[in-house]
Image (cartoon, rainbow, N blue to C red):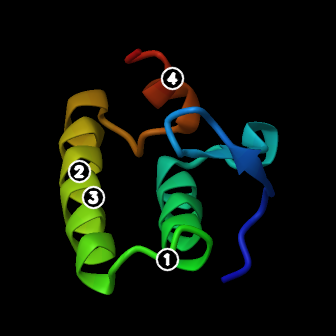
Amino acid sequence: SSLPGSLSGSSAAGWPTVACETMASAVEALTAWLDHLAGERRLSPHTIDAYRHDVSSFLGFLTGHLGSEASVEDLSGLA
């Protein structure tokens, strides 16, 4: 899929390094991460679906809590 931003490697936790200045939406970051896991890490489609479900549920909760769609900046503030 074509998303703004680019993957430029992986963090120690296996999360792709994303150019966050061009990817403000947490949903865009989720899609990039799932694409990375499916393509480069070659995880099972069932694992990808489970991750998508769980993280999407969390983002839905966070959207309700924040009152608007979560951004990458919102997520980084949780750490």
Disc 3 to disc 1, how far (Cα)? Answer: 20 Å
- Identify whether 23 is placed above or below 4: above
Which residue in the structure is indicated by mark 2?
Answer: 60
Tell me residue 60's x, y (percent): 23, 50
Q: Nearer the viewer, residue 30 or 50?
A: 50
- Identify whether 21 is placed above or below 32: above
Tell me residue 68's x, y (percent): 38, 40
Tell me the kind of residue under disc 4. Answer: Ser
Query: What residue is shown at x 30% (from left), y 29% (from top)?
Result: 66
Which residue in the structure is indicated by mark 3?
Answer: 56
- Identify whether 54 is placed above or below 40: above
Query: What residue is shown at x 18% (from left), y 54% (from top)?
Result: 57
Of circles 3 and 1, which is in front?
1
For label 1, the crowd category at 10 Å Cα-Cα, with few meaning under 14, some 14 to 19 and many 20 or more, is: few
Of circles 4 and 2, which is in front?
4
Disc 2 to disc 1, how far (Cα)? Answer: 26 Å
Disc 2 to disc 3, how far (Cα)? Answer: 6 Å
Disc 3 to disc 4, how far (Cα)? Answer: 16 Å
Which residue in the structure is indicated by mark 1?
Answer: 42
